Structure formats: structure tokens, C-alpha cells
Image (spheres, helix red, strand yellow):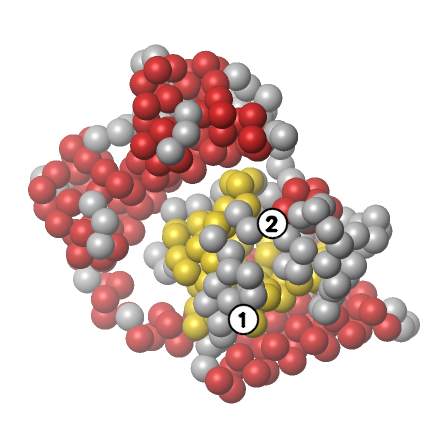
Amino acid sequence: MNTNLPIFDIPSTIKYYLSLDKKVPQSFGMDKYDELLHPDNFAILSNEGSVKNGAPIRTDHYAIILCIQGSCHKTVGPYSFEVTPQSVHIVSPKHVTSFENASDDLLLYMVMFKKEFITDTFIKQSALDPLMDLNPACTPMYRLSDDHYRKTKQLYERMDQEYKDGGPFYLQVVRLQVVELLYEINRAFEKCNDTRNNHQLSRQYSLFVSFRNLVEEHFISKRTVQEYADMLHITAKHLSEIVKQETGRNALQIIHNRLYLEAKLLLTTSTLSVKEISDQLNFDTSSHFSRFFKKFADENPSDFKKLSVA
């Protein structure tokens, strides 16, 4: 699908989500108002001064995000979850990401990096790749035990101090600390994986994961539960029951939510007109697209687009 969408690098992502209403003191990480002179392939920062609702974007980098306090709702590709204190989540460049309803007290510690940043270590890339791309069957968000949270928070703080001190070989040390952080995240993942191992092996859960992956691949061309059920060789009723049990939502909601996310992405980051976006998303008419969008956003796509570029 050729949408001519921008892929946001680290400085662009920071600027895109930074609220310019007033400068906010930065208690952790880089100063986001200071010309963003940091290297293009790494940043350590907080969310302080960010907008409360972040429109969907695609990025060219990873982000590992630790929630210190507050909450928000996050979407990363096909996964939607609540970000709450003592949790950590990963954003991969292969997924569209967005957030909304950030609480006033939300405080996140974030590390952003391109793959190239950590492959420039003595550790083989074949060992690093599995650390960055976890099991796609699992939501990339993990709640940490008190001890694990404390150690992870200290690691972020050590990384921040190392970067700010800028001593000899500081970037090499920071690279190794990012790798250490990846290993810590994988420990959290393994604990999560162990607790639901039997669940993941069940046919029901496997079918749900397959459905979710198929939606991610075919949401532009396939809009009905029946089409996905046919691809999975089960009945539409059975698929709907599985999705309801796993998510509390029905299968059609999953399909429509993914389509809505792509619509927001195109409206906020592309130069396409509403009519062109309607065609891009395979709606028969722009009026049909407007009705669909308004059901989710309580406003038509043209008004949404105007506000997003204002």
C-alpha cells in the first residue's frame, strides 16, 4: 500500500508529541526543548511536556518505556492496553503506535534507539534480534514485581547519568546499558510467558492470535468476520465467541478499530485528501468513510484533519 506516509525518526517523534504551549521542567533525561542535538539513533528522556493524546505514527526506531506514575491508554499495532505504574512496554518500528487519555500526573522514562545503535557492540546481531522482537502472541507490556521495577528504574537512572556526564567511552557504556535493559525486559517477558504457557498452547488462543495477525495484514481488503473465519477454517460464530472470550470485544470491533487507527494515521500524517484516504482504505464512497469515521471520533474526517494540522 503506497500511502507516502512519513516514517518518524527519533527527533521527529519527540517534536511531534511535544506540547509547545509552555516549557515544562525536565526532571529526567534530555531537554526536549534544547534543539534536539542528540544523536539520531538514541535518546533517553521523560514524557514531561508531551501532549495528552498522541495521534498514530510510524517510526524507524524502538522505544522501551517505563511507567513511574499516572496512566494512559496505548495502542501498538494490534495491541491495546492501559499503561499503569510499575509497567514497562516496548514499541517496535514495525507497528503503528498512538496513545490517548494521558493523566495529568503521567511520568514515563523512555529510551529510544535504532537497531544500529546497539548492533555496534561486541554482541552478535543474531543474539540481539530476539531481544528486540518478542513473541508476537504476547502484548508487549509487562507489569514488574517491586524488586524488578526498582532495578529497572535504577538502570534508567544510571543510563541517564552516564549520558549526561559524557565521560570517556560514555556512548559505548550506554549501548551496553541498553542491551542490559533489553535482557531485563526479556526476564519480565519470560515470567509473563511462563504464567500463561498453557493458555498459549490452547487451540482457542492460537486461533485468536492468528485472527489478530490476519487483521493486521488484511484489514484494508477484508472487512467481515466471515472472511477471517473462512481463512481460519472455522465458523464466524465460533470466531466471534473466541475473540469475545479473549478480549471482551467482538471480532468486528477488532477489524473496525484497526481500520480506524489507519484512518487516523493517514489523516494526521499524510497529505492525502479525505477522498483520497477513502479510496486508499477501500471505501466505496467518501460519504461511507465519513460515516464510519464519525462513529468512532464523533466528528467527520475533514474536521479531524483540520484540527490535526492546526
Is 155 placed left or right of 137 in the picture? right
Is 260 placed left or right of 62 in the picture? left
The picture quadrant where one finds residue 300 is: top left
Q: Is residue 285 above or below residue 11?
A: above
Is 85 placed left or right of 18 in the picture? left
Q: Report which residue position mark 1 lands on.
A: 69
Q: Is residue 147 above or below residue 208?
A: below
**Distance between the Cα atoms at labels 1 and 2?**
16 Å
Q: Report which residue position mark 2 lands on.
A: 51
What amino acid does circle 1 point to? Gln
* Residue at x 59% of width, y 65% of height: 108
Residue lying at the far right of the rendered structure: 168
Question: Residue 234 location in percent, x, y?
Answer: 12, 42
* Residue at x 57% of width, y 32% of height: 308
* Residue at x 57% of width, y 83% of height: 150
Crowd class of label 2 (few under 14; some 14 to 19; many from 20; radius 10 Å): some
